[in-house]
Image (cartoon, rainbow, N blue to C red):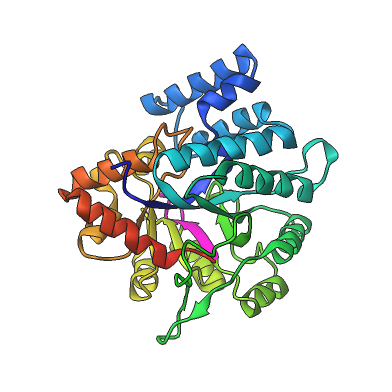
Amino acid sequence: METIEKTDLHIHLGGSFPMSYLETISTPNEIQQLKSFIQKMKEKGETMDYHACFGAFSLVSKIVNNNSKIENGTAALCQCLAADGVTYVEIRTSLKNLNEEGHEAYLNAIFSGIRKGCANTKLRAAILLSVKRNSSVEFVKETWRLCKLHFGYGTVVCEDGFESAKPTDYPTVLDCAKVVGIDISDDALLGNGEHVIPLAVMQEMRSMHVPVALHIGECVEETPEQQMNELNYYQPLRIGHGVFLCDEAKQFVYSRRLPIEMCLSSAVIAHMVTSAGEHPAIALLLDNYPVLICTDDPLIFETSNTKECELAAALCNVSIADIARFQQNSKKYIFH
């Protein structure tokens, strides 16, 4: 399975640094706290639920706490992805102002890490800038400023009127280290995502064909009103997780054939489903619906794209050739 060329379109930087890298820059206490937390997540104790899982990111951020570590950690991640057979990845990250060096310094550190990690490999990487549902207007505007400054190739409009990623130049002319879209993410109950990005910014994003990937249906407490408000407002081109979609949201997503970013190990460990076979995207995949096999957070969920492909193959009872076909189809939905 490692020899298959893979595409990972749902992976968060803060949850994906290789453990081997973190061990070189952390104190014994820091790394033990992180490992213990990850183990507790797998054991699914009473104190650990979907919302509590986000605590892992805080532990990682205490270790990767300056731009030099961000750069080297990004490079280490890219090298691991390349070794796993990933040839294209979109890495999601929320901007950070580490040591008062500014948000752009943080982003440039990631770009530098991508260039280092992708050198002499088949891997090409791009960035989605993440916005939380409770982000301040000032933060969103800064995110948009840097998105515009570093934006990649944009999207095109299909004959059916829906926007879609442009796959024609994958992967040879795709430049490394570009921002290719916006991600709406984090704990689904931090706030109602509708209008966290001001209307004026959304209008500018649409005029520039900047695509949105929306985390939705990852928390059972999401209301139909919240889901429909977010879907209608953001008009996303990809859906993250999509486990708990209300009937109206399913109609919205499925009628447009919006691809589902399926993260099986994440869904189990983060308490979205009790077993990977319960993930609704499995049935969709067997029905030739566009489902993208992704990792979410390889560090936190102790997985890789190869492991996710093997799990999907076992659940769907399909061959390696079928998985290769699924991965090839994923290229249609990259943001560039």
Q: Is residue 86 above or below residue 326?
A: above
Q: In this view, does 155 lie to the left or right of 159?
A: right
The x, y position of residue 3, in whole percent, is: 32, 44
Q: In this view, does 164 lie above or below 77?
A: below
**Quarter-of-image position of residue 147:** bottom right
Residue drawn at 74 percent across, 64 percent down? 149
The x, y position of residue 92, in whole percent, is: 57, 50
- The question of residue 297 being in magenta is answered with no
Does residue 221 appear in this view?
no
Q: Quadrant of the image for the N terminus? A: top left
Farthest-out residue, right: 100
Residue drawn at 54 percent across, 46 percent down? 187
Give, as a single range, the part of the protein colored magenta.
212-222
Q: In this view, does 90 lie to the left or right of 4?
A: right
Residue drawn at 74 percent across, 33 percent down? 66
**Quarter-of-image position of residue 139:** bottom right
The x, y position of residue 163, in whole percent, is: 48, 77
Q: Quadrant of the image for the C terminus? A: bottom right
Comparing 77 with 38, the one in front is 77
Q: In this view, does 306 lie to the left or right of 185?
A: left
Q: In this view, does 159 lie above or below 78?
A: below
- The question of residue 217 being in magenta is answered with yes
Comparing 278 with 315, the one in front is 315
